[in-house]
Amino acid sequence: MGPPYAALDAIAASYPALKPHLDSGKPPTLTTLEATLEPLLTGSSWRIAPAALSRELGYEAAVDSGEIPTREASWHDTFNLLAFLHFPRSKRALHRRALDHQEQRRAAGLPVRRRSREEDALALIDEAALLVAGSAPALLDFDEARRIGDLEVLDALVRREGLSVWVFGHALLEHLILGRPPIGAGIVTVACRSRRREDVDAALAARIDAGGFPEPRMSPTLPWPDPRVDRWLTPLQTI
């Protein structure tokens, strides 16, 4: 693993059993995940399942049935499980929305795997989005500063307006642990004055349910990783 990052530090602090794996860079086994995370998933009605279930039912259908297909010793799937823990309503809404599209195509005799533009948008959010939450006026200012592309201005605005920033896309966390070169993280703004994760989750889920992401639109991106962006992700906000 590369330098320390707030998002990974927060995970290590919240899930001590995962800390040795984060320190070594070696992903946890399915057995470790079942012992560590499955008890926490109980209240959400989800269970960790072998990845083969995805091939049998299809990923979205498996999730809709309460199972989260998970590969053995996979950082990508480990962080996906954490996303289900941290944003359960949004994850349920996202995968249900995708499944609805699949069922509509199946009923119409169309290829089920031919994704719609909305499904493309949801897939990008699922994998590579940072959530930025705050008041509507503050988010308008944030979007304008993002279009200009000045990180110093964005940094000052996030602090001044008290915007909360969250890692939603699990591939972004995988990117950190594997020490990959910087990329652009997509941005989804969420109008929610509360800084509580549960409230941000509810607001995002409602937007997904309402079809609020008809096509991919997460640009301009922000550099990931970047020390300024990382400073926005306090342990309280990421976990």
Image (tube, rainbow, N blue to C red):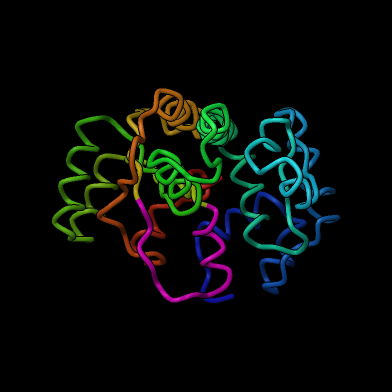
Rendering coords of residue 186 (x, y %): 36, 53
Quadrant assignment, res 83: top right
Q: Is 171 in the magenta?
A: yes
With 166 as the anchor, is 149 left or right in this view? Answer: left
User: The N terminus lies in which quarter of the figure?
Assistant: bottom right
Residue 38 vertical placement versus 88 (above, below): below
Q: Residue drawn 30% across and 57% down?
A: 221
With 120 as the anchor, is 12 left or right in this view? Answer: right
Q: Residue drawn 64% across and 39% down?
A: 85
Q: Is 219 in the magenta?
A: no
Quadrant assignment, res 67: top right
Rendering coords of residue 215 (x, y %): 33, 41
Q: As rendered, which of 145 and 117 lies closer to the eye?
A: 117
Residue 79 vertical placement versus 117 (above, below): below
User: The C terminus lies in which quarter of the figure?
Assistant: top right
Q: Residue drawn 41% across and 60% down?
A: 230
Residue 202 vertical placement versus 20 (above, below): above
Q: Residue drawn 70% across and 29% down?
A: 44
Q: Number of labelled discs? A: 0
Q: Which residues are magenta?
A: 170-186
Quadrant assignment, res 103: top right
Residue 26 vertical placement versus 206 (above, below): below
